[in-house]
């Protein structure tokens, strides 16, 4: 789950990532399946971590945050 604003998501994102900006998450919780694993991320990791905590507090069980966020992923991915 890409928690960045949509413009950042359009500039690049992890393959198959769904964009749900952090500010919209609470309004969309009922559209998500709490039984599925979720990996959250943002640019650096802070907002992704906040999103992870929201999901965990709403009974999502398999929630992980990509440490370092998209910037780390983009800088270290192999082409």
Image (cartoon, rainbow, N blue to C red):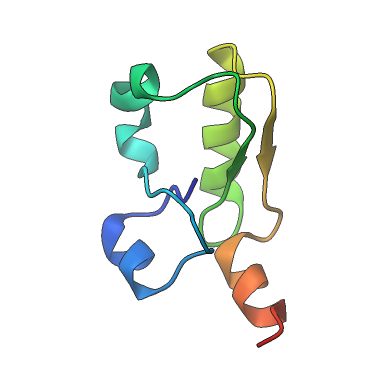
Residue positioned 37% across, 31% down in the render = 25
The correct choice, above or below, for 76 with respect to 6 in the image is below
Q: Is residue 28 left or right of residue 58?
A: left
Residue 27, quarter of picture: top left
Q: Is residue 14 left or right of residue 3?
A: right
Residue positioned 56% across, 51% down in the render = 41
Q: Is residue 72 left or right of residue 8?
A: right
Q: How many marks?
A: 0
The correct choice, above or below, for 66 with respect to 29 in the image is below
Residue positioned 60% across, 19% down in the render = 35
Which one is in front, 60 or 16? Answer: 16
Which one is in front, 36 or 58? Answer: 36
Looking at the rendered image, the quarter that the C terminus falls into is bottom right
Q: Give the x, y percent position of residue 74.
A: 60, 76
Q: Residue furthest bottom?
A: 79
The correct choice, above or below, for 60 with respect to 14 in the image is above
Residue positioned 32% across, 26% down in the render = 28
Q: Give the x, y percent position of residue 1.
A: 49, 45
Which one is in front, 62 or 48? Answer: 62
Q: Give the x, y percent position of residue 24.
A: 30, 34
């Amino acid at each position: 789950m890409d928690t960045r604003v949509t413009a950042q998501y359009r500039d690049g994102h992890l393959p198959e990532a769904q964009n749900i900006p952090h500010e919209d998450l609470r309004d969309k919780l009922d559209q998500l399946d709490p039984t599925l694993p979720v990996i959250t991320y943002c640019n650096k990791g802070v907002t992704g971590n906040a999103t992870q905590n929201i999901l965990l507090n709403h009974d999502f069980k398999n929630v992980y945050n990509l440490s370092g966020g998209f910037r780390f992923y983009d800088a270290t991915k192999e082409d």
